[in-house]
Amino acid sequence: MEFVALYVVLSVIIGYLLGSINASVIIGKIFYGKDIREYGSGNAGATNTLRTFGKPAAAAVLVVDFLKGIAACLVGRLLVGHIDNFGWAGVYLAGFAAVLGHNWPVFFGFRGGKGVLTSFAVVLYISPVPALICLAAFIAVVALTGYVSLGSIVGAILWPVVSLLFNLPAVMIAVAVLMSALIVISHKDNIKRLIVGTEKKLSFKNKKLYNAVSEFIVFTRLFR
């Protein structure tokens, strides 16, 4: 059991370091000579990258932020495996650590993003169906309101609820509550702007929205 605890700690450390690889900061500094945290909303994430540097940079950020969440879970699975009475605790904790690393990256002065995409990657790895339900809610909210922040908050709050409905392990539900709370708290400034009506909307053409929703529907069919 002592070795298991050691491997859990090691998984958490590696997960945190993986999460600290903040793609938006790295891409901004290398390819644009700018620190994304000094522009737009000041958030080191995909949405602010899209608004500041454009689609190619945002796409790269999406890929990296997603993959590092998956990589952290894989580390937890390989090092710790399944623990009696605790399930895949190494996976859950390593994934959560990756989100912490994204939000407070050790490599970039502990100033990062809000962890939404990395959280989604972790949720998708752990429980694909609940993750896709949350993604559907996110897409619906963004499509109806244009607010990415509101969609993120709704999706985050929904995850622990869906996890309960699917009767997932208690350890995972506890991590889900922590990650959801982290996302909501990180959006506190967005919540204030939503209340006063000053939050920026994501602008898109109807055709682009239709294509995005269509692609999502095709993607979800793969899990049926």
Image (spheres, rainbow, N blue to C red):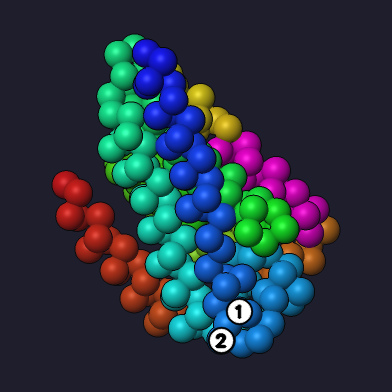
Look at the image and tell me in which quarter the N terminus lies. top left
Residue at 59% in and 45% down: 100
Residue at 37% in and 21% down: 4
Within 10 Å of disc 1 (Cα), the crowding (few <14, some 14-19, many 20+) is some
Residue 220 location (% of width, % of height): 25, 55
Q: Main secondary structure of the magenta part?
A: helix
Magenta span:
179-195
The residue lying furthest to the bottom in this view is: 32
The residue lying furthest to the right in this view is: 196
In the picture, the disc for residue 31 is 2
Q: Is residue 177 left or right of residue 224?
A: right
Q: Are dots 2 and 1 in contact, CB under 8 Å?
A: yes
Query: Alpha-carbon distance for marks 2 and 1?
Result: 6 Å
Within 10 Å of disc 2 (Cα), the crowding (few <14, some 14-19, many 20+) is few
| Residue 95 against residue 172 in the figure, above or below | below
Q: Which residue is mark 1?
A: 28
Please, what is the three-letter code of the amino acid marked with disc 1? Gly
Where disc 1 sits, the SS reads helix
Toward the viewer: 207 or 94?
Answer: 94
Toward the viewer: 57 or 215?
Answer: 57
